[in-house]
């Protein structure tokens, strides 16, 4: 039971740090107060989701993809309620999930690699560079895919939504007559 409480506390702390970071990023973008607050809540939700999925054994790229997709879908719901573009909520909310530590370790190992003289040390550093660089790229790609695919697929002007409207006959007479 105490392990579960400790994990819940860690999830809440992780989410709160993401909220603070997101609000900071949103303020830099000169977003309004309601947008900052909603984006912050979405950041906390997304980061907490990724945290839980990581602790359930999912990889960081896969858990980032799931969390980014959840944030993107929730941002679309908030955007419809508040008549604001979904990107205003989704992009600041995803910024705290950028894998900065992996990128930092890539640069640090690269600098060490350039100054190392022993072949064994250079070989180990090369493996570390490749691992961290690939992890950074995979997580960034997962965040982009998780954010963009729902926005494109479910946006009112997307071909998928227009196709569904045309088949349902609710496009207001805008469907092409073939």
Image (cartoon, helix red, strand yellow):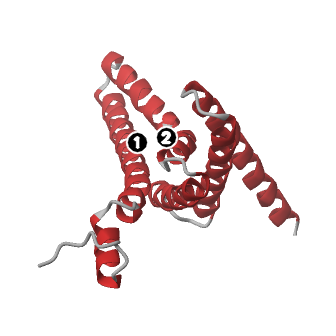
Q: Residue at x 35, y 25 (%)?
A: 110
- The quadrant in which the C terminus is found is bottom left
Q: Disc 2, disc 1: CB below 8 Å?
A: yes
Query: Left of 96 or right of it: where is 136?
Result: left
**Residue to which mark 1 is pinned:** 136
**Residue to which mark 2 is pinned:** 99
Query: Left of 77 or right of it: where is 9?
Result: right
Q: Position of residue 109 (x, y in %)?
A: 40, 28
Residue extending farthest to the right is 2
Please tell me whether residue 140 is drawn above or below residue 80 in the rendered image: above
Q: Nearer the viewer, residue 161 or 67?
A: 161
Q: Residue at x 33, y 32 (%)?
A: 120
Q: How many marks?
A: 2
Q: Residue at x 69, y 42 (%)?
A: 37
Residue extending farthest to the bottom is 168
Name the element at disc 2: loop
Pick whichever of labels 2 and 1 is earlier in the sequence: 2
Name the element at disc 1: helix
């Amino acid at each position: 039971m105490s392990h579960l409480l400790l994990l819940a506390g860690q999830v809440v702390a992780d989410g709160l740090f993401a909220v603070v970071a997101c609000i900071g990023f949103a303020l830099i973008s000169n977003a309004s107060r309601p947008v900052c607050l909603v984006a912050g809540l979405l950041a906390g939700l997304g980061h907490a989701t990724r945290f839980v999925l990581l602790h359930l054994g999912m990889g960081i790229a896969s858990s980032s993809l799931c969390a980014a997709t959840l944030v993107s879908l929730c941002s679309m719901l908030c955007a419809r309620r508040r008549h604001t573009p979904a990107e205003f909520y989704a992009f600041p909310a995803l910024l705290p999930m950028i894998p900065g530590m992996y990128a930092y370790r890539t640069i640090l190992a690269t600098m060490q690699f350039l100054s190392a003289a022993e072949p064994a040390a250079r070989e180990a550093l090369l493996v570390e560079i490749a691992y961290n660089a690939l992890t950074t790229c995979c997580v960034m790609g997962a965040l982009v895919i998780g954010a963009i695919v729902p926005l494109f697929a479910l946006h009112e002007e997307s071909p998928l939504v227009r196709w569904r409207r045309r088949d349902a006959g609710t496009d207001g007479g805008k469907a092409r007559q073939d």
